[in-house]
Image (spheres, rainbow, N blue to C red):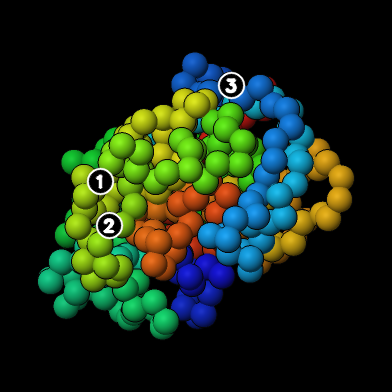
Amino acid sequence: MGDCCSPNRSGLAGAMSRAGAHLGPERTSGTRLEEMIYIPGGVFLMGTASEDGFLADGEGPVRPVQLKPFYIDACTVTNQEFADFVDDTGYVTEAEKYGWSFVFYQFVSAQTRKSAVKTAVQGTPWWWVVEGAYWRQPEGPDSSVLDRMDHPVTHVSWNDALAYCAWAGKRLPTEAEWEFAARGGLVQKTYPWGDELTPNGQHYCNIWQGEFPRVNEGADGYFGTAPARSFPANGYGLYNVSGNVWEWCADWFSPHHPATGVQVDPKGPETGQSRVIRGGSYLCHASYCNRYRVAARSSNTPDSSTGHMGFRCARDA
């Protein structure tokens, strides 16, 4: 599953140590609710029956879900926000512990290709295993985030995201909360803004334009990540819930859902191998990974990190 849109460490890490995450001090008093969006809760229709959906992903069936009120970040966590966390706690991400992370091949410099590329992912050769790639050096040792501190942090695993949430006095959203908020109050629309991908010829998200994976025309203005606060917000005030970066959710992934009845505050399966990611990324294209639709879903192992996965936080109301 993860290999389709987001490569995972399974089978590549080998005997490398899987040291546990250091959560650092919880900072509940430092949470700034004014920077979060209040979502009133209620009943919504989760999932899709669209022919554009992926049956194997468990996008359907359409099912009623009831949620209590909650808060969610308007934007994904940025490089600056993650830097504040690291500076405060000394946290070391899993990409740093492993010594490598997954990078899209077109972003790797010639020098890094010669010195730091270990291998390409079988089946998805556009993903390269790059030594020294982590959130501060997203394309390898000769790259930096200093000119994109307002962009989403990437190369963070689910475990890393959980550590940040604990420090910030927040949590990851459940998958149901994420979809409820991402829909922005619209009912069963394809995207957070409606059913048309480019209304009036305008781009509303950061995805791939051109021929994947060779030619990206960049018609939406970006080839990699865009600033976390880009494009029009949805009806609830959330930015970039379609495209830009995949977003970690709290739930274990399963393609199966309860068949009947209204689900109340669902939290997904009790166990699993991969965690849910939602929203798609700047690499999504209709010809390959049409998962920037609001009902689309994928997954990855909790210790995996890539150049197109990030997260936003939630909090109980």
Residue 115's label in the rendered image is none
Q: Amino acid at mark 1?
A: Asp
Residue at horizontal 21%, vertical 53%? 218
**Secondary element at tag 2:** loop
Please identify, in this view, whether the residue under mark 1 or under mark 3 is nearer the observer. Answer: 1
Q: Position of residue 1 (x, y in %)?
A: 56, 70
Q: In the picture, residue 299 is in which quadrant?
A: bottom right
The residue under label 1 is: 220
Q: Amino acid at mark 3?
A: Tyr
Residue at horizontal 51%, vertical 80%? 11
Please identify, in this view, whether the residue under mark 3 or under mark 2 is nearer the observer. Answer: 2
**Secondary element at tag 1:** loop
The residue under label 3 is: 38
Compute the Cα span from label 3 to label 2: 33 Å
Residue neighbourhood size for the residue with mark 2, other residues' Cα within 10 Å, grouped as few (<14), some (14–19), many (≥20) = some
Q: Quadrant of the C terminus?
A: top right
Q: Position of residue 124 (x, y in %)?
A: 39, 77
Residue neighbourhood size for the residue with mark 1, other residues' Cα within 10 Å, grouped as few (<14), some (14–19), many (≥20) = some
Task: Residue at the far top: name it.
Answer: 34
Q: Tell whether label 1 touches label 2 (CB within 8 Å).
A: yes
Q: Image check: 58 left or right of 37?
A: right
The residue under label 2 is: 209
